[in-house]
Amino acid sequence: MQVGIIGLKYAGKTTLFNVITGAGLPVGQGGVEPHRAMGTVPDPRLDTLSELYQPKRTVHVQIEWVDVPGFEPGAGHDGAREATRFLEHARRVDALAQVVRCFDGGYGEPDPAGELATVALELILADLQIVEKRLEKLEKELRLKGKTEQPLEPALFERFRSHLESERPLRELELNADERRVVVGYALLTLKPLIVVLNHAEGEQPAAEVLAAAREAGAEVLSLCAAVEAELAELAPEEAAEFLADLGVSEPAAHRMIRAAYGALDLQSFFTVGPDECRAWTVRRGALAPTAAGVIHSDLERGFIRAEVCAYDELMAHGDHAAAKAAGKVRLEGKSYPVQDGDIIEIRFNV
Ligand SMILES: Nc1nc2c(ncn2[C@@H]2O[C@H](COP(=O)(O)OP(=O)(O)OP(=O)(O)O)[C@@H](O)[C@H]2O)c(=O)[nH]1
Ligand SMILES: [Mg+2]
């Protein structure tokens, strides 16, 4: 699972990529190759569990990030080449996080609403190209054979075309499960989940109309100052805590952004706890208990008997596992149990 950090040039993509992954790349230099790195998904719940269990090891979830090179609209041939490259890399990721420059910083007046519109249009036009090509093929197939291999496709792609022609992203459309299956192979950009990161100057807040434009992009919206986040990431933990306390917040804004991207990937976390290790694991939302067991080890899925489950909030409300159990908050769940975000799970198995 990969999240692509996208946006126009100078938006602060590489700055944020560094904050998230610790990659330490030079910023303000552009570049034509994407950067990839894993980044920890911070989870204060896991930190609290670690304080409770004092395990030898605490292991957070990691997801992969791609710093997609930016483009500059209206920059002639170079601009067109950059845009093509941008689309190519954006197509390969599972979710998009668009960074929008709301600070001046010597790069000229910010135009956040314009940036949002430019990127949205680029993605829409790229999808329209794919959809039109597909429709041409389908028409040919219909002419020659009287039917298409995938009967759903003609109507679906017509619907796509008309939506894209009205310059709207496809993620706004309701698709049923069959339609979703059909479109997977096309890597349509405006079907990918998108979060918007408004990168504003230190101490500033995005204007109401910018927020509205960002929400209009059909996405979760976060605002932060990448420069401040970068400073924070450089500090020792105690210093960072002081810095955050001065700002009156409990965690860096970048952490919220990472979790938003994680959620956009349709992922959730469950925990395993013990004296050796406290660990967060990833499953898709809606995944059943045996699948979660399989994430830990294939033997646990094969020999799955039951899952002993306690919700994180219940554990915290009762103070510890034994108290939660005494209060009847530790449940035994079977194979059809859909794992919930924050479940603390112990798998009973037999192989
Ligand atoms: N003042 C200010 N400057 C920032 C902020 N975020 C990034 N910058 C600066 O803006 C410049 C561009 O940042 P990058 O992170 O390289 O931007 P980018 O989006 O990766 O740009 P390209 O790779 O060229 O597309 C750098 O000089 C950063 O130091 C911010 O929040 N405030
Ligand atoms: Mg960059």
Image (cartoon, rainbow, N blue to C red):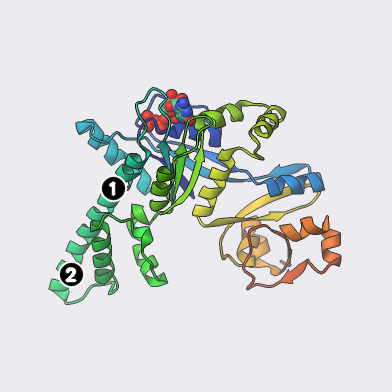
Q: Position of residue 181 (x, y in %)?
A: 39, 67
Above or below 117: residue 101:
above
Q: CA distance from mark 2 to mark 1?
A: 30 Å
Q: Is residue 26 visible?
A: no
The amino acid type found where label 2 is placed reads Glu
Of callouts 2 and 1, the N-terminal one: 1
Identified at 69% across, 54% down, the residue is: 271
Horizontal arrangement in the rendering, residue 260 relative to residue 6 (left or right) = right
Label 1, on which residue? 121
Label 2, on which residue? 141
Q: Position of residue 64 (x, y in %)?
A: 51, 43
Residue 99: numbered disc: none
Q: The C terminus is located in which quarter?
A: bottom right
Decide: few, some or many residues near mark 1? Use Cα within 10 Å; few <14, some 14-19, many ≥20.
some
Callouts 2 and 1 close, C-beta under 8 Å: no
- Quadrant housing residue 155: bottom left
Kind of element beneath mark 2:
helix
Whether the residue under disc 2 has CB within 8 Å of ligand 1: no
Above or below 292: residue 44:
above
Q: Is residue 80 visible?
A: yes
18 and 287: which one is in front? 18
Taking the view exactly as shown, the residue that stands out farthest to the front is 208
177 and 219: which one is in front? 219
Horizontal arrangement in the rendering, residue 315 relative to residue 145 (left or right) = right
Identified at 64% across, 39% down, the residue is: 251
The amino acid type found where label 1 is placed reads Leu
